[in-house]
Amino acid sequence: MDKDWILYTGEIRRIFSNATWVPLRAYRSKTYGITNVMDVGYVEDFFGCGAVAFPPRHREIAEQLSWDDLGGSHSARPEAYTDGYYSPIDEYEYNDKEPIGIEFVFEQRQPVIGKTIWILNPDLVVALGLIKEENNWVRPEEDFEVVVRETLDENGTQQLIEIKRVFLLDYLAARNLALRLSYYRQRVENVFALKGTPYEKLESFRDEQHGGRFELLIRDLKDIYGGSWASFHVWRTDIDEEDDAPKMGPEDDTNTAFEQSQGVRAGPVGVRVEGEFWRDEWIEHQGLSLRVRGDVDRSLPSFIVDTDGTREASARLNNQDVGCWLWFRPSIIIELLKHRCFSLKWYTAETGGIRSTSGYITHFGLNKADLVTVYAYDIARLAAWEQHLWAGHNVAPDGKLSMELYLAQVKAQVASTHSVEKLFFLSIQLLEQGFRKNFDVNLFNQDIDEAVSVQQINRFQSESQASLLRLSKDIIRVFSDRLNVSELRKISTDKNKDKLGSNKLLQSILAQKVGEEKARQTIGPIVGAYDLRVGDAHPTGSKIGEALQLVGIDQSRSYLQQGEQLIHNVGRAIWEVGQLLFGKE
């Protein structure tokens, strides 16, 4: 280690009142290499912190509280008094029966299992809407952002619980509290001698700096761990060990004996260099509580609402009767689906909904210009962070309103259409049922989670040729890669069936019913999608063009529309296989 390390040159300048993370409780010690505190080479770095929140009326008393009151020896536990008064665990008492503050981390001692457990204040957890995931508390409503995190040592003992300051300030504002931190840092290194080390020019000193108190102690190890000692041994002499039920009377000189000894212990050779730093500080709220109290958020975005680029603030759009729509690039859907717990659901061929962690389903429509149109109020009511995502894809109106969205939201009529995505999965289900009923076999060798797959197989995934090829890979993964080849070979009568792959086996079974040419034409889009899947890994221009043609994709259309065609044509081919094999069934 070096001089800056022992003197906390960097750390003492940094305060928690402007840090991203604020400790609520800490008792963390780290040693490097040698673990015997008396040996030369021993190095330790300790950080301890306590925190209690106080209302304004107790601020004057709280100003007097420091490390001894809030930190090392303090623990938040309930207290039951003999007169019937009970002090709950979240109350900090200045004197007995005199609560003046709020505890954020509770301490539960479990002597039977030899552990002490720290518990985060449930009021803070519920108020901020947190859930525990492994060593973190996250807020699902804000994209599962980590709000509180804990650090454990190698034995699983809690060493640190800290909270992200922006959420702490929100909670403090809602309760009109200020958080008082008191923390202590200690660094120790044992050296053989000061000479030749980074500490040879240092001397012990005390200093007030950066709102705290620093002390450097340089002492010989023998003065700390050596020196004189004495022991005094006393025992009873009036008990007969042969008695069946011995009893001791009052103790006096006639029934006791003693012996004493003393000596001098030579301490270890070496020097202990120790730096210590204490500081108290306040974490003050800013009077704003968006999450807990629901204060108005002044940082919400604005949105383009007219063809001339006119913008309106989100707050003005947050009215169910606002009467206007917003336009967005289709890339917004994929951006949203990247976030945890967001999902896509289709209603009609051109309309659907995005379920988000705000608890809302945002109803959208696709227009002729491939733009996503949404009623403005449906965006303005979302959580702030979601609105900012939408705002990043907002564009001026173009291509008019989605006709099917117009029918639903203006005419109160639902279009009698279905999305190609929904029909794709329905076709797979029907074909699977047909094979089970007519051939008594499972068409697929494994099940899929359709709710998950529909998030991956949708037209919005197609933004370029590369992403179109990836979409084909997902389609084949859901259909061709799952086909139960061993069962299909039992059904097929093709002489080369043992050499055929999944798609060719399905084609051979169909050919038994309708002939080879008709089967080849029907399966064509599926084979073309399979070739596109291969093209994703080994792109060759001419082969990709041939595969696109086989699928029936019009390359003059936008990539979003090509993605829609890909899903539609493969889904239709799957449906036609079922129709040809099983008829109306």
Image (cartoon, grey):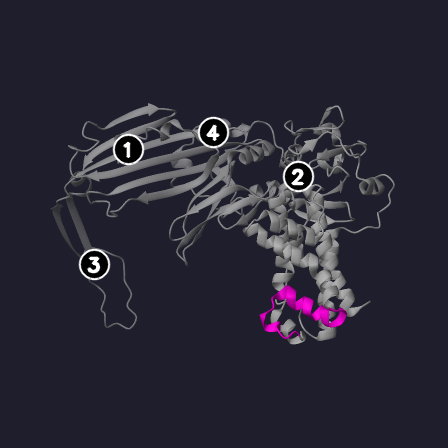
Q: Residue 235 got which mark?
A: 3
Give the residue number, with chain letter if any, for mark 2.
332
As measured in the structure, the alpha-carbon distance from the residue carrying label 3 to the one carrying label 2 is 83 Å
- Which mark's residue is nearer the viewer, 3 or 1? 1
Q: In this view, does 16 lie to the left or right of 522?
A: left
Earlier residue among tags 3 and 2: 3
Q: Is residue 80 visible to the viewer in this orientation of the structure?
A: no
Local secondary structure at mark 3: strand
Task: Give the mark nearer the N terminus: 1 vs 4.
Answer: 1
Quadrant where the N terminus is found in the figure? top left
Q: Which residue occupies 16% across, 46% down? A: 229
Q: Which of marks 3 and 1 is nearer the N terminus?
A: 1
For disc 4, the marked residue is 17
Instruction: Identify the mark nearer the N-term, 2 or 4.
Output: 4
Q: How crowded is mark 3: few (under 14 residues within 10 Å), some or many (20 or more)?
A: few
Query: In the image, what residue type sits under mark 1?
Result: Ile
- CB within 8 Å, label 1 to label 4: no
Residue type, mark 2 in image: Ile
**The magenta stretch spans residue 188:** no
Pointers 3 and 1 in contact (CB under 8 A)?
no
Q: Position of residue 521 (x, y in %)?
A: 73, 61
State which mark lies toward you, 2 or 1: 2
Mark 1, other Cα within 10 Å: few <14 / some 14–19 / many ≥20: many
